[in-house]
Image (tube, grey):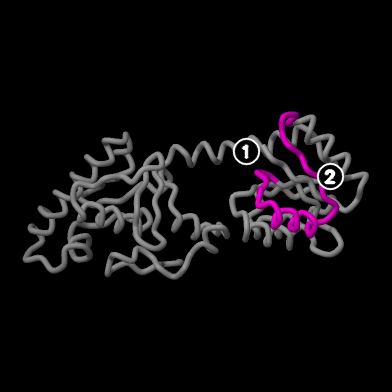
Amino acid sequence: MRIYVIDDEPIALNASEHVIHSAVPDAQITSFTSGDEALEVLNQTAEYPDIVFSDVEMPGTNGLEFAVRLKQISPKTEIVFVTAYAKYAVEAFRVRANGYILKPLTADRVLEEIQGMNNIRDERNGLLKIRCFGSFEVFWKGEPLPFEREKVKELFAYLIDRKGALCSSQEIAAAILGKTKSRLEAKIQTGSLIRNLRKTLETIGQKDLLIRSRGRTAVRTKGIDCDYFRMLEGDMEVVNSYRGEYMSQYRWAEIQTE
């Protein structure tokens, strides 16, 4: 694990480095007295840290400005702010810092933050991963999830777009099948697609992601790692990755922010 520690006060910097080393003795720790110095090294080496413990109130580029610039070049780096000023907590989470510690830094708090990050990674690694930005794609354990029919994949995309709302057969049919002759025809055609989708999810042990209630269908959003859902939650890393295209292969798809 590569860790950066940033603090403009040498005594505080040395103390933080010592505490972090005692908490994670196997980590490779590098110290800096300014965010600008750390960014310069990053640009020269392109060896990005796993975690940065940074003070907030510093001359020149302060911790919040540093975090924004760091996330632009290394979005996967985790950031923990270490400061004596509680007022910075809100700003820290606006730039999606992954933790916030009030001074003095302790080994227990360092371990708590690192374990929290690992728990998030482990949780996401066990989830079905869905990409909505650009074209709609579904991944399971790093591999594309195969669908028997394109319309089954489109059904899943539509349910994702609906963000967990229950959808009737008529509504689904109108969106992904076009006009149908009758309510019965819509029910038969969408029923076939839903059964196929459930079968596909069952092959990876995820059939419970599909919810059926009184003839309506939805997805269980909490069992999914989806860029669209994370954007709606305010994940700035995902917001910054959006390039204006959303489920581009489907005519009905239109991003909703409400």
Q: Secondary structure at mark 2?
A: loop
- Quarter residue 133 falls in: bottom left
Labelled disc at residue 103: 2
Q: In the depicted view, which residue is nearer to us: 125 or 165?
A: 125
Q: Position of residue 208 (x, y in %)?
A: 32, 39
> Label 2 sits on what residue type?
Lys
> Label 1 sits on what residue type?
Gly
Labelled disc at residue 124: none
Q: Quote the CA–CA distance across marks 2 and 1.
A: 19 Å
Q: Earlier in the sequence, mark 2 or mark 1?
A: 2
In the displayed image of the protein, which residue is found farthest to the right? 11
Is residue 43 located in the magenta-colored stretch of the structure? yes
Q: Residues within 10 Å of mark 2 (few under 14, many from 20)?
A: some
Q: Is residue 238 left or right of residue 88?
A: left
Q: Position of residue 7 (x, y in %)?
A: 84, 50
Q: Position of residue 111 (x, y in %)?
A: 71, 33
Q: Which residues are magenta?
A: 24-51
- Quarter residue 158 falls in: bottom left
Q: Position of residue 214 (x, y in %)?
A: 22, 49
